Structure formats: C-alpha cells, structure tokens
Image (cartoon, grey):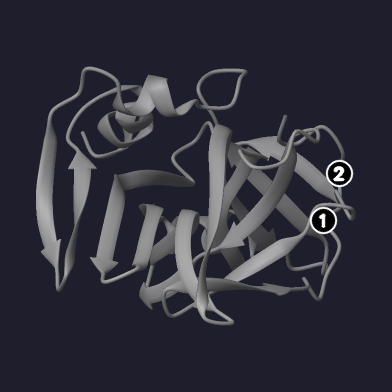
Amino acid sequence: MSGDSVSEPSIPVFSEAGADQHQTTLRYLVTANSNASDCEFYVNAIGKGEFSRGPVLLRWLEAYISVDEAALAARAGGIIENAGMYVQHRDVNDSSASRAGLYLGSRLEPAYYRVKMTYDQNHVQGGGVVAVRREIQSLAFFLDLRRSDGSIERFWLKNGTRDYTIDVIFEGQPLKHTPTGAGEVGFVEAGPVFNQKMACIR
C-alpha cells in the first residue's frame, strides 16, 4: 500500500519517455507523508489507452492531475517537485509477488500534469514478438512538495484510507473515447476517483 514508509527508497521510479517509461531516480528523500485533504491536488481525468500497429501493441493507464500550486506556495512557502501515480501490479507471465512503482507526471502547463503507466506491451525483438503483461492491482496519486526549509512532504490521494483499484475506477462507468492516431483512450467520466475534484471546484 502506498505511503507505508516515509521515503520508500526500494520502490523503482519511472518517468515518461514517449510511449514507454524509463527508470530514473528522485534527487531527494521524502521526509513526511500526508493525506491530500485540503484540495492540494485532484485527478482531473483518467483513462485506459490502446495503440496497435502490426505486431506492436500498447495498453496504458493515463491520468491528468490538477495542482493548486498558488495555494500550496502561499501556505507552505514551497515548490512542486513532482506529481504522479503509485501503481502496484503483478506480472501476468511471472508468478512472483506483486511489484510497485512510482510513475512521475509530465508537466504540461502550470499546475497541470499527465502521468502514464504501460501495463501491456508487444514489441519486436530478435525477429520475434515479446509480450509484457501486467495486472494492475492498486494505485494512488501523489504530489511532492519542497517546503521553504528544504524538507519534502508527499501528499497522497487515495480512495479513503485505501488505494484505488481498477474496478473501483472503471467498473460500470461510462467512457468517453478520444482518438490517438492508431489508437484511442477511453476516459472514465464519473466515479469515486473524482470525489476530490468535485469537492474542490465547487
């Protein structure tokens, strides 16, 4: 579960790189964890994407995060280091235990971030097709704030006290499909993942 330890140094970190993620490192240690209970940020949109061309296949989770940067700076005297998503998954082709990763968002514009996590992928390698299949078990969203004293506070957005599951976010919810070249993203339009948004934009 996300936020069980302060710095979580053993969890790999990934940044967006085109259609894939590259493993990277954080240049800081998280010194405190807090719940995002005061509209620090919220999920503005989330969907499942799919792209296919010949043997190549990509399926990914894509979320957009809105951050109240001005209010955070005024209240905490700090700056935003990162916003992103914590994902726990199981490799379908591997019976090993669950794995987790922190996926860093890309800042699209002030106070707005996009974060992706590829969970299914076919790619051509050595004349054959290699398939990677991951089953997402839980996820949560986070924002890292550097306070004026240099300490890093991580704010977590969850489904109450628990991480979200894919079923909680998507099951029974209508989708709005957005074309993306040879693929599309199906964005969910309602559900508990937007509770914070609904409370903050009133």
Classify residue 65 as left or right of residue 202. right
Give the quarter of the figure containing the N terminus.
top right
SS type, badge 2: loop
Quadrant for the C terminus, please.
Answer: top left
The x and y percentages for residue 39 are 44, 40
Query: Which residue, given by chain and number where applicable, does mark 2 sit on?
Result: 6
Q: Say if 146 sits above or below 170 in the image.
A: below
Q: Are marks 2 and 1 in contact (CB under 8 Å)?
A: yes
Quarter residue 109 falls in: bottom left
Which residue is tagged 1? 30
Q: Amino acid at mark 2?
A: Val
Does residue 36 appear in this view? no
In the rendered picture of this protein, how many numbered marks are placed on residues? 2
Residue at the location (54% across, 18% down)? 160
- Which sits in the foreground, 168 or 51? 51
Tag 1 or tag 2, which sits nearer the N-term? 2
Neighbour class for label 2 at 10 Å: few (<14), some, many (≥20)?
some
Residue at 11% over, 56% down: 178
| Residue lying furthest front | 127
